[in-house]
């Protein structure tokens, strides 16, 4: 039954979050700051993981498709579609749930236990709106760009793998990239990214906002935030795939 | 002036505040004292609306606060300055940004006017050349002074302080106490301080309310408290050797 309590409280928190900001100028300033903190500072990890994953997908596909009846350019196609359909949206989402999610939960949780949130409320500031809405808006705006970067870098990683390992000819890889491209896959990936961005900011914010006690509890909230965000990302991945690709 | 009428607050059927009625007067430092766990922090948080009360009334001037809708409560809260036990400064903001925060949120001052006001408030609390430092870079006493500067930046009508001396040495505690007293008199505000520091009681207790197990046990001022005939209050006041020696000498 506790799950219903949390779901109810989460949606009540969202009603506080989605109210009119006190001052639009400050709100936009916060969005820009959060875009830097949640998005720009995640580019490094997204690039590193994507380049290696693109290379690995290419190599694994190449080593598993040694049948002469299957044209080698399909390896490029597989790498491209794997990056677009699953890796750059879902796997990057899961990685960001760990990086960004724990950061948000611990930041807001620490503010809660050190009475900074109470201080905001006493000043007459809607603390949920002030602290959480800029994070959600920033992530929803910036994460699609991270996904696009991830797609390009991952595909480039596959190309590098083809060049440096000789598992397939780079020309075949590039031919595969051009073969049977379905533009809607990009739309599908970006729609998923927007949902995941909402999850990886709002769920950890909820856990941080209702933290209590001390450092131990904040750590626990941070862990719970990552676990719940990850599970929700996987759940929504299935739902959205069924809705958008079926 | 803040008036409490028959305030009752409970958590999970345990009554924490039992029928508290008291008036906190303007231009005076009103102290809530009591042992740890007596309910004084809950009382302070109930007065400012962080803990909704079960029954009773909390009246700011002539405005009944406890049953107000949130948007009206917000307007009263903008007349409130609060000094939290740990300071509650925003870690990621400098001293200047902390003090400027209420001005940014609730005024249309120009940048220059805001800087002037911040410097005025920091001067009031005797804090110089600390504008660009972060809370982690200054001492506990300085953090308390920054918190006071932030609390008075919007010219509040009400100032609340939760254990302003906790974690401070006796000399710094006296500095903070005197500062709060000065500000109360200078701006003619209603100040309510939650403390169990007897030095503060003797130093600045214009009005003192002793809370015992959620009940208002005694009410008076700093001149009356040392001669009050109330066993629980006496046990609280004369708990230390120093205070017992002081009692015997007088």
Image: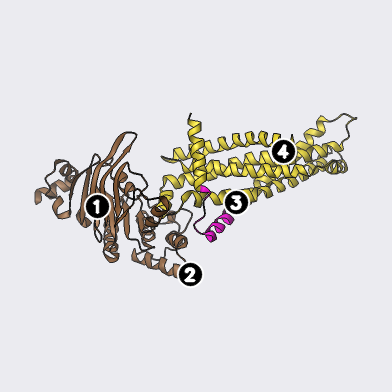
Marks 1 and 4 on same chain: no
Few, some or many C-alpha atoms within 10 Å of disc 1 (few <14, some 14-19, many ≥20)? many
Residue A8 image offset from top left, x and y in percent? 50, 37
Q: Which residue is identified by label 4?
A: A244
- Quadrant placement of the N terminus of chain B: bottom left
Marks 2 and 1 on same chain: yes
Q: Which mark is residue B31?
A: 1
Few, some or many C-alpha atoms within 10 Å of disc 4 (few <14, some 14-19, many ≥20)? few
Q: Which mark is residue A138?
A: 3
Real-space CA distance between mark 1 and mark 3, rounded to the nearest whole angstrom: 45 Å
Colour of chain A as rendered: yellow
Q: Are marks 2 and 1 in contact (CB under 8 Å)?
A: no
Q: Provide the chain ID for the residue under circle 4.
A: A
Q: Provide the chain ID for the residue under circle 2.
A: B
Q: Answer with left or right where residue B203 lies relative to residue A140.
A: left
Q: Provide the chain ID for the residue under circle 1.
A: B
Residue A203 image offset from top left, x and y in percent? 55, 40
Few, some or many C-alpha atoms within 10 Å of disc 3 (few <14, some 14-19, many ≥20)? many
Residue at image location 38% in from the left, 55% down from the top: B77
Q: Answer with left or right where residue B182 lies relative to residue A213.
A: left
Q: Which residues are magenta?
A: A17-39
Residue at image location 14% in from the left, 41% down from the top: B231
Q: How is the image coloured?
A: by chain
Colour of chain B as rendered: brown
Real-space CA distance between mark 4 and mark 3, rounded to the nearest whole angstrom: 25 Å
Question: Considering only order in the chain, which callout, 3 or 4, is on the residue closer to the N terminus?
Answer: 3
**Mark 2: which secondary structure?**
loop
């Amino acid at each position: 039954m506790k799950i219903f309590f949390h779901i109810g409280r989460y949606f009540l928190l969202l009603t506080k979050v989605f109210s009119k900001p006190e001052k639009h100028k400050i709100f936009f300033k916060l969005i820009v700051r959060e875009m830097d903190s949640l998005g720009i500072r995640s580019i490094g990890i997204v690039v590193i993981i994507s380049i290696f994953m693109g290379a690995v997908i290419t190599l694994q596909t190449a080593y598993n498709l040694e049948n002469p009846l299957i044209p080698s350019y399909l390896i490029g196609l597989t790498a491209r579609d794997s990056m677009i359909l699953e890796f750059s949206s879902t796997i990057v989402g899961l990685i960001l749930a760990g990086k960004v999610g724990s950061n948000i939960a611990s930041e807001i949780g620490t503010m809660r236990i050190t009475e900074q949130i109470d201080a905001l409320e006493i000043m007459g500031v809607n603390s949920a709106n002030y602290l959480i809405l800029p994070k959600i808006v920033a992530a929803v705006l910036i994460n699609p760009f991270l996904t696009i970067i991830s797609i390009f870098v991952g595909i480039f990683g596959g190309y590098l793998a083809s060049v440096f390992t000789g598992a397939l000819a780079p020309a075949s890889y590039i031919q595969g990239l051009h073969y049977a491209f379905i533009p809607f896959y990009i739309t599908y990936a970006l729609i998923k990214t927007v949902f995941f961005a909402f999850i990886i900011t709002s769920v950890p914010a909820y856990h941080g906002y209702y933290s209590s006690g001390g450092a131990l509890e904040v750590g626990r909230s941070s862990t719970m935030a990552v676990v719940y965000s990850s599970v929700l990302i996987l759940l929504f991945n299935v739902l959205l795939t069924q809705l958008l690709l079926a | 002036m803040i008036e409490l009428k028959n305030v009752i607050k409970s958590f999970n059927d345990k009554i924490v505040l039992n029928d508290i009625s008291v008036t906190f007067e303007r231009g005076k430092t009103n102290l809530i004292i009591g042992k740890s766990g007596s309910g004084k922090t809950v009382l302070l948080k109930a007065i400012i609306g962080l803990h909704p009360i079960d029954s009773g009334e909390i009246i700011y001037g002539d405005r009944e606060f406890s049953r107000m809708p949130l948007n009206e409560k917000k307007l009263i809260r903008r007349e409130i300055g609060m000094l939290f036990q740990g300071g509650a400064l925003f870690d990621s903001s400098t001293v200047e940004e902390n003090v400027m925060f209420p001005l940014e949120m609730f005024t249309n001052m120009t940048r220059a006017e805001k800087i002037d006001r911040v410097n005025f408030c920091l001067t009031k609390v005797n804090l110089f050349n600390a504008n660009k430092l972060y809370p982690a870079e200054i001492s506990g006493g300085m953090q308390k002074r920054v918190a006071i500067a932030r609390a008075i930046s919007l010219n509040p009508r009400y100032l609340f302080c939760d254990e302003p001396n906790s974690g401070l040495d006796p000399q710094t505690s006296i500095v903070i106490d005197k500062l709060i007293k000065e500000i109360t008199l200078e701006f003619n505000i209603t100040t309510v301080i939650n403390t169990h520091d007897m030095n503060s009681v003797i130093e600045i207790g214009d009005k003192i309310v002793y809370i015992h197990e959620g009940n208002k046990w005694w009410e008076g001022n700093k001149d009356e408290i040392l001669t009050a005939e109330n066993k629980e209050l006496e046990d609280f006041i004369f708990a230390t050797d120093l205070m017992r020696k002081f009692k015997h000498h007088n």
